[in-house]
Image (tube, helix red, strand yellow):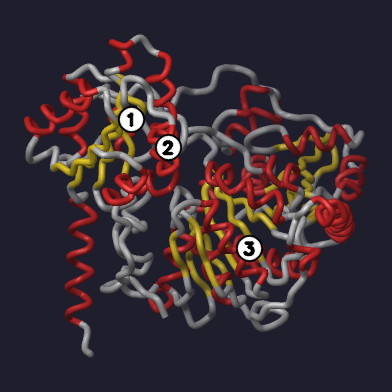
Amino acid sequence: MSNYAGRIPRESMIMKRSGKLLVNGDEAVAYAALHCGVKLGTGYPGTPSTEILETFAEIGGQAQWAPNEKVALEVGIGAAFGRARALVTMKHVGVNVAADPLFTAAETDIAGGLVIVACDDPGMASSQNEQDSRHYAKAAGVPMLEPADSQEAYDYTALAFEMSERWHIPVILRLTTRISHSKSIIITRKLGQPQAAPGYERNVRERVMIPAYARPAHQKQVQKLKEIREWSETSSFVQVLDGEAGTGLIASGISAMHAREAMPKTRMLKLGISYPLPLKAIRSFAASVKRCLVIEEGDPILFEACRAAGIPVEGKPEKYIFGELSVERVRRIISGDMSPEPVAAKGKPPQLCPGCPHRAAFETLRKLDCIVSGDIGCYTLGVLAPFESMDTCVCMGASIGIGLGLRHVLPDAQARKVVSVIGDSTFVHSGITGVVEMAYNPPPTGHVVLILDNGTTAMTGLQEHPGTGRQLDGATTNTLDIVALCKSIGIENVVVIDAQQNQAEFETLLQQALASGKLWIIVARKPCILAFKRQREREKALAAKPN
């Protein structure tokens, strides 16, 4: 059993004699994974998906953080090739990183169950875009399930593994922020277990995707999806909720909950599967009502699929594509209300913690009027007041490549001001290849990469990563040496400094690096005060445990 030291396992903390738990959607997925025999959980932390693996580890599952989502999915694929059930978790932008193995794995023969949990963030509560992961199901050609509450998150996780094993295909379970973080009661039960014990059977034609094998594999994939579509027509994923037949609503996931609350007396088709869609059931439902509306959060994917199939449905106005839906917004969609929506009260803008070691770095970058190519993490807040010292931020790891691009094309005076800023976890995630590019194609003016190393994945909740020397559960492991890695790539000037304690020295060092015309890696290293405190508490708890 794997537990955080000094913390009470969730199983003993909230499990009731009746088998009921009050949990959020992330926790429900974790419990289902444990109860249905998942052998390995892997992923990369990202709100709103992070709690899935943390909970899975706390209640006894084998869970681990991967350097990034691509690696996590590849590890999951390997486990599934070994006839084990594997759970891979990520937020929506992480699916972009994992897309390369996903598209090809969809055509291979998955011996064990492989379920990918993609947690979308409508309204961008903590994300850089408002991407809708439902596009990936169709593009990759894999089934996608959408739970509407914690109970369905629990049930659908188990069903997703059964589907994956039955059709030998990965299955995506799509949650959204509201499902991931809202709590409701679930009733746990005995879930279906893996069809066989882990073991490897050679199957070259189904797993080595050279063109000669990939062509028939793609045809098999299409046939699998046809079978899943036909099966879904009469599955538990299709529910007709009775009501007045004048207007009918079609919805899935959290949108179904909003729609039912907004119009409780209206007839509704509630879908638990987003792809492939049970078009016969949808067509039959649309024919049973006078007016049929599709209520969906995000892009009009369900609406467009219905219209492409010739099913007469109405969609939502474009203005409702953006942000989360709510009961009130659903009422406005149904009534055709296009009046301006109430403006939400402005909250307190996020900011770096008092005493955060990143503060000194951004104060210096602002003072030197640097052109800062930024990245994803706590330090992204350097774009806001009082620092206002970040010029670009696109995706994980992009700071180095974008900074190099600017260096290659800007006039000399401007080029020498460009600095790429990246965190330690983000560097491990997808910054290493940027440094390889820097050494391979150095700009004429050189370049400066500033790695803000606070020893944790702070923004998503202080998770471990390969550079901390600790695994998900706090156990010690090999530590990635960022300095040695950068030097091995060919970067000669690699310096570690405490920018907070030695801010004047840091400013002088940064000026020297910018003026040198050479390649520099400056590692501004100081532990996050929150992560440091948690680690000390963990160590005390371990020391207090009886041998």
Q: Which residue occupies the foreground of this view, 95 or 509?
A: 509
Horizontal relation, residue 303 to residue 83: left or right: right
Residue at (36%, 69%) from the top-left corner? Answer: 473
Sequence order check, earlier mark of 1 and 3: 3
Vertical comparison of 431 with 225: above or below: above
Gap in Å between the C-alphas at discs 2 and 1? 10 Å
Disc 2: which residue: 434
Q: Amino acid at mark 1?
A: Ser
Q: Which residue occupies the foreground of this view, 65 or 282?
A: 65
Gap in Å between the C-alphas at discs 2 and 3? 26 Å
Q: Amino acid at mark 2?
A: Gly
Q: Quadrant of the C terminus?
A: bottom left
Query: Do labels 2 and 1 touch, CB within 8 Å?
Result: yes
Q: Which residue occupies the foreground of this view, 463 or 289?
A: 463
Horizontal relation, residue 77 to residue 205: left or right: left
Q: Helix, strand, or loop for circle 1?
A: strand
Disc 1: which residue: 420
Horizontal relation, residue 458 to residue 249: left or right: left
- Res 496 → quadrant: top left
Disc 3: which residue: 77
**Residue 107's x, y, as percent?**
77, 55
Sequence order check, earlier mark of 2 and 3: 3
Vertical comparison of 181 with 451: above or below: below
